[in-house]
Amino acid sequence: MSSGPGWLPCDTGPRQLRLDVVSSGPFTAVADELVAADPALAAIVAEHGMPPFWSRPAGFRSLVLLILEQQVSLASGAAAYRRLRDRVRTVMPAAVLACTPEELRADGVSRQKDRYLRALALAVEEGALDLDALEDMDDDAVRRALVALPGIGPWTADVYLLACLGRPDLWPVGDRALQVAVAEALGLALVPDATELERLGERWRPHRSTAARILWHGYLARRGRVETPGDLLDDLGYSEPAATRTAASGSRSSTS
């Protein structure tokens, strides 16, 4: 998946769109509601407890990490990010653009992801992509802005909306871990494809982001895995206490 997490609180200013962002209180209330109404989600929580409340900060670094996590395990993506971070000290657009292809290859970044990272960095550096402005856009507008870049497809855009912008009704149908998690939770004989997962997710609308977190939580817990490590959250700009954090070794597979 780009697997499992909670949310950072939004500001309480007048920007109307940001009022529809999942934060700690609403997450707990909605999760309780879903679990009370849905036996499949209730079984996950009964076995593994309620998932911790988590998010990733919005911004360039989180998008870099999401690109590095495409089609690999969370641990592999995290390892490549750490090597890049150790090389450039601060993962910023100019620093990424200054890296040679050979340096990125040594950090575990493939040629394809090298191209994606450079396109993202250039778009942010030149102002073609205003990451701060995404917070005030609706979901479809955010998707359009992100998928216009090479290497950012529906999966990356949806996970960014869910985990970084805290949108409440995201359902990343291309996320392999979510597909498997739903199959396990519902006792399906076959793992659903994206089209079938879209249909199955309707039962949790308009709170599919919270349902996804519970399902991911079950998927990871059954495999002895958890989410983003604290050192990466520190680097991304996360501000929650270390005690609320978890370490990443989950499996995630997606197109982009």
Image (cartoon, rainbow, N blue to C red):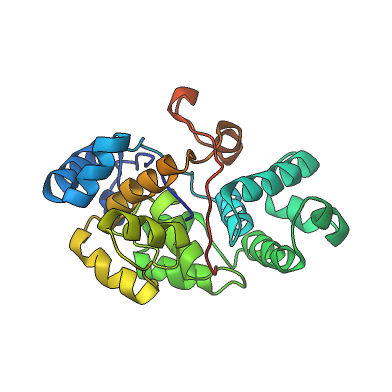
The quadrant where residue 168 appears = bottom left
88 or 19, nearer to the observer: 88
136 or 248, nearer to the observer: 248
Against 40, residue 222 (above or below) is above
The percent coordinates of residue 191 (x first, y second) are 38, 66
Against 76, residue 115 (above or below) is below
49 or 68, nearer to the observer: 49
Task: Give me the residue at 12% from left, 49% from top.
Answer: 37
Task: Give me the residue at 56% from left, 55% from top.
Answer: 66
The percent coordinates of residue 146 (x first, y second) are 51, 67
The quadrant where residue 71 appears = bottom right
Looking at the rendered image, the quarter that the C terminus falls into is bottom right
Q: Is residue 60 visible?
A: yes
Against 105, residue 226 (above or below) is above
Horizontal relation, residue 229 to residue 245: left or right: right
Horizontal relation, residue 186 to residue 85: left or right: left
The quadrant where residue 205 appears = bottom left
The percent coordinates of residue 218 (x first, y second) are 36, 45
Query: Total number of numbered labels?
Result: 0
Horizontal relation, residue 150 to residue 164: left or right: right
Task: Give me the residue at 32% from left, 36% from top.
Answer: 48
Task: Give me the residue at 33% from left, 69% from top.
Answer: 197
Horizontal relation, residue 65 to residue 31: left or right: right
Q: Is residue 134 visible?
A: no
Against 10, residue 170 (above or below) is below
The percent coordinates of residue 140 (x first, y second) are 37, 70
